[in-house]
């Protein structure tokens, strides 16, 4: 989701970040408070829509709300729009969000042969098209080249035309491949592009690309292709010894066979291999090995030269660079998915700590001291009975969008939605000595946020909402709970049940807390003591309190 801001014309370095619901006006309860007499107390609101856009709504202001010079009641706003409230001018700016890029993998089974382990397809899947065979005397290494990253000599160090030509070939190949290897490509599409371009640069009949599996010890056949783009009619056989040398010593190897040599005409393995010439190179970027590329010729003896080996090595270097980028894209995609999943439960700073490894939420089943908050819409059943299902859904989504944004601003963790109710936690996954006070202040901020939302609802003729909030504190069991199919991080214990009961006691607009909560926040909040109350499941009445105020309600910047 992209971030959006209103930037005052008179203070262009100041940016007001827009949330799910941003209220603007003179009153200090607004998200953006403007001390200008041309602006009404509750002048306008900006809503974030379901598709990530933004809408501006006038709240019946005296001097009006204008977009692009035209007075509006409600309209969408886009990047660069001028927004005027009374005589105060803003510029709306939206920043572009990240674009997720995916790559594909395939399930494979393992077939161990020799020093290099080949990974073949699982039973019932498409054949890999590659098999390892032990090297016979008929195969000999004609040339080898230690792989190094392509580098170019400074002009004053070039002493021969041959060196200049080699550098030119490297640049030419890099230029041609850069137009083919796109970062947004699917991994298999990228490998096909590498194989196809290899046929354009060297006189090979077939090409195979094998990638290193996550264990770092096995190879997976990913692409097997013959010139023209089709799959080979027969299994492509690779030399075990050559692959061992390529992977272990990171050398590019040029091989020839002796099928035409009378000394080996009786060797059955020569006929089985049916390879005249072959080259095999490792796929490397810096010190990271991604796999190997193999090309061969079935019809021409000594089809490849030293220059072909150098060109093939340059292709491999570019392919290694492309595969490194692809692996980074996969990592970014994985982190993006993790952020999206955790972002539904945790505040943004906690999400970053989990993704970066600073916070471990895998440790479960531990006792933790936690403030537990429940919120619940009063009269929801009555309201929903007279509404269409789609209208109920829109109402709840709009309401939860505002509540969860406030929760995250105060560093709380969303535990779950329960119909129109919400359960939130302070003190997990990160222990927090000040979490209980922030829970109380967050609850008051939620009531303020709901008042702002209700001004929008009333302006469009909808019934206002009212919520009750209850907060309790104590020791709970925190950790992953569920089945193998689905697991949620949550808390259990009597503290949770009591918090739910306190919420049930709370009238619309109130925040009810337990005595344990009061002991932790005493001196920072003003409360009204209520009569001892009998709660379901409790043998004796408990003392409860209604929160009147809790000091500063601006959320801490670190939350």
Image (cartoon, rainbow, N blue to C red):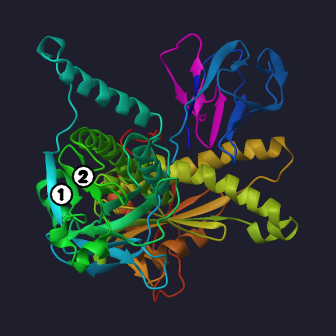
Q: Which callout, 1 or 2, points at the residue further toward the start of the chain?
A: 1
The residue that appears at 46% across and 66% down in the rendered structure is 232
The residue that appears at 59% across and 58% down in the rendered structure is 510
Tag 2 secondary structure:
strand
Residue range highlighted in magenta? 7-33
Q: Which residue is mark 2?
A: 281
Q: Work out whether residue 62 can be spotted.
A: yes
Q: Is residue 485 above or below residue 502?
A: below
Residue 58 spot, x, y in % from top left: 78, 30
Q: Which mark is residue 246?
A: 1
Q: Work out whether residue 135 can be spotted.
A: no
Residue 125 is covered by the magenta coloring: no
User: Residue most toward the front?
Assistant: 262
Cα separation, mark 1 vs mark 2, equals 6 Å
Where does the N terminus fall, quadrant-wise? top right
The residue that appears at 28% across and 56% down in the rendered structure is 277
Question: In the figure, residue 215 lies in which quadrant?
Answer: bottom left
Residue 169 located left or right of residue 205:
left
Question: In the figure, residue 266 lies in which quadrant?
Answer: bottom left
Q: Is residue 512 above or below residue 42?
A: below
Q: In the depicted view, which residue is nearer to us: 417 or 195?
A: 195
Q: Is residue 538 above or below residue 78?
A: below
Residue 22 is covered by the magenta coloring: yes
Q: In the depicted view, which residue is nearer to us: 142 or 359?
A: 142
Q: Residues within 10 Å of mark 2 (few under 14, many from 20)?
A: many
Tag 1 secondary structure:
helix
Q: In the depicted view, which residue is nearer to us: 136 or 183?
A: 136
Q: Residues within 10 Å of mark 1 (few under 14, many from 20)?
A: many
The residue that appears at 33% across and 57% down in the rendered structure is 296
Residue 350 spot, x, y in % from top left: 37, 53
Q: Are marks 1 and 2 in contact (CB under 8 Å)?
A: yes
């Amino acid at each position: 989701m992209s971030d959006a801001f209103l930037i005052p014309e008179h203070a262009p370095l100041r940016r007001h970040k827009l949330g799910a619901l941003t209220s603007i006006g003179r009153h200090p309860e607004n998200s953006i408070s403007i001390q200008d007499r041309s602006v009404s107390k509750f002048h306008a609101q900006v809503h974030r829509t379901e598709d990530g856009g933004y809408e501006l709504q006038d709240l019946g202001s005296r001097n009006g709300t204008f977009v692009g010079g035209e007075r509006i009641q409600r309209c969408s706003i886009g990047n660069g729009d001028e927004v005027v409230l009374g005589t105060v001018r803003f510029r709306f700016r939206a920043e572009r969000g990240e674009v997720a890029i995916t790559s594909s993998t395939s399930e494979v089974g393992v077939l161990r042969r020799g020093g290099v382990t080949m990974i073949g397809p699982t039973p019932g899947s498409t054949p890999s098209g590659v098999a390892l065979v032990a090297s016979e005397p008929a195969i000999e290494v004609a040339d080898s080249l230690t792989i190094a990253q392509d580098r170019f000599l400074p002009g004053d160090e070039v002493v021969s035309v041959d060196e200049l030509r080699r550098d030119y070939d490297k640049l030419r190949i890099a230029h041609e491949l850069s137009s083919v290897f796109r970062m947004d490509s699917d991994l298999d599409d990228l490998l096909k592009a590498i194989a196809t371009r290899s046929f354009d640069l060297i006189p090979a009949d077939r090409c195979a690309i094998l990638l290193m599996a996550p264990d770092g010890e096995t190879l997976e056949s990913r692409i097997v292709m013959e010139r023209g783009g089709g799959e080979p009619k027969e299994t492509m056989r690779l030399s075990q010894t050559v692959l061992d040398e390529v992977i272990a010593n990171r050398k590019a190897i040029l091989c020839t066979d002796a099928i035409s040599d009378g000394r080996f005409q009786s060797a059955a393995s020569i006929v089985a291999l049916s390879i005249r010439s072959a080259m095999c190179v490792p796929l490397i970027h810096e010190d990271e090995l991604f796999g190997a590329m193999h090309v061969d010729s079935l019809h021409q003896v000594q089809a490849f030269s030293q220059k072909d080996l150098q060109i093939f090595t340059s292709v491999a270097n570019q392919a290694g660079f492309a595969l490194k980028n692809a692996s980074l894209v996969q990592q970014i995609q994985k982190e993006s998915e993790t952020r999206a999943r955790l972002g539904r439960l945790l505040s943004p700073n906690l999400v970053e700590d989990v993704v970066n490894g600073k916070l471990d939420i895998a440790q479960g089943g531990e006792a933790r001291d936690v403030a537990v908050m429940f919120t619940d819409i009063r009269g929801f059943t009555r309201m929903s009975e007279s509404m269409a299902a789609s209208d109920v859904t829109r109402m709840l989504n709009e309401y939860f969008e505002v509540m969860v944004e406030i929760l995250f601003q105060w560093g709380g963790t969303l535990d779950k939605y329960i119909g129109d109710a919400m359960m939130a936690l302070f003190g997990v996954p990160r222990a927090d000595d000040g979490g209980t006070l922030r829970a109380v202040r967050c609850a008051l901020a939620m009531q303020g946020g709901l008042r702002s939302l209700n001004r929008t609802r009333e302006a469009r003729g909808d019934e206002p909402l009212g919520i009750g909030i209850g907060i309790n504190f104590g020791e709970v069991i925190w950790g992953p709970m569920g089945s193998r199919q689905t697991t949620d991080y949550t808390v259990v214990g009597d503290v949770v049940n009591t918090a739910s009961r306190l919420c049930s006691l709370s009238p619309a607009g109130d925040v009810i807390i337990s005595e344990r909560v009061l002991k932790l926040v005493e001196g920072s909040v003003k409360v009204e003591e209520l009569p001892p109350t009998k709660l379901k499941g409790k043998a004796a009445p408990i003392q409860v309190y209604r929160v009147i105020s809790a000091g500063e309600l601006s959320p801490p910047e670190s939350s």
